[in-house]
Amino acid sequence: MSIWNPWHGCHKKSAGCLNCYMFRRDSEYEKDSTIVTKTNSFDLIVKKKRDGTYKVQSDEGYVYLCMTSDFFIEEADEWRKEIWRMVRKRQDLNFFIITKRIERFNVSLPDDWKDGYDNVTICSTCENQKTADERLPILLNLPIKHREIIHEPMLEEINIEKYLQSNKIEMVTCGGESGPNARECNYDWILNTRNQCLKYNVPFYFKQTGAKFIKDNKLYNIERKEQMKQARKANIDTGKLL
């Protein structure tokens, strides 16, 4: 697994953005997170070593694209065209794009996209019912071969059954919020989403508890390094059912 950030900077868009880790980290260096700029890693995915092999090799598998910005942010509309060309060139890698701007998906889309690239997964984040009902109908109706949903940070119980029954969603991921001002995440919400996924035979992944985790009506304050570990201990992840 590798991370590729061709640009940095973003604008807070919805409730899930309130305590964004990127803004928090930039503030430590008095950096303005709202200024979107290209990074030195812009062409990372096609850079080669002296022996002619790619720096990011095929065995990396998945490449997470734009983790310190949004791939579909307005300032990157022109840059995105070049990124799509690189993605198309690296068919040996699978690119995972997480976005809160699914409504901008068609902006700067390459002419040869058609019904999607085999090596691209588009994941729409939905932190509450409002964003799920705004974004998921769009996600389902776009020409995309691989679609996933992320509830992170999960801020309330969310019903996505009508979207799951489309048979177009390949995975649903849930997770709580990290950081000093993290909002609470309730285990009941996680289990509810898992049950919806089981009902429609969609794989489910519990990524992390978050810093403030409620289970059996008790609030647990969980250190950052333990949040993913505790999620694994729950042992509730599922694969595709037969």
Image: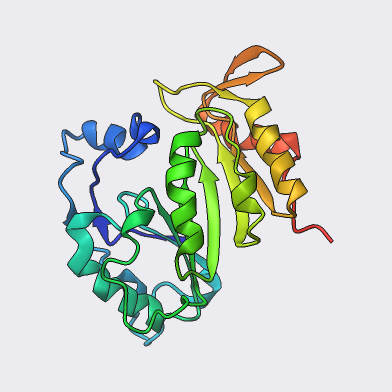
The residue at the far right in this view is 242
Any part of residue 39 in sight: no
Q: Nearer the viewer, residue 47 or 158?
A: 158
Q: Nearer the viewer, residue 54 or 150?
A: 150
Q: Nearer the viewer, residue 181 or 150?
A: 150
Any part of residue 2 in sight: yes
Expressed as whole percent of the image width and height from the top left, the position of residue 231 reads: 65, 35
- Residue 49 vertical placement versus 105 (above, below): below
- Residue 34 vertical placement versus 61 (above, below): above
Expressed as whole percent of the image width and height from the top left, the position of residue 53 reads: 41, 84
The residue at the far bottom in this view is 52
Say whether residue 186 is left or right of residue 44.
right
The residue located at (60%, 58%) in the rendering is: 169
> Which quadrant would the C terminus be assigned to in this image?
bottom right
Expressed as whole percent of the image width and height from the top left, the position of residue 77 reads: 21, 64
Location of residue 40 (image quadrant): bottom left
All told, the count of numbered labels is 0
Say whether residue 206 is left or right of residue 93.
right
Scheme of colours in the image: rainbow
Location of residue 194 (image quadrant): top right
The residue located at (63%, 29%) in the rendering is: 189
Say whether residue 182 is left or right of residue 77.
right
The residue located at (59%, 29%) in the rendering is: 157
Q: Nearer the viewer, residue 56 or 76?
A: 76
- Residue 118 vertical placement versus 66 (above, below): below
- Residue 208 vertical placement versus 39 (above, below): above
Expressed as whole percent of the image width and height from the top left, the position of residue 75 reads: 17, 57
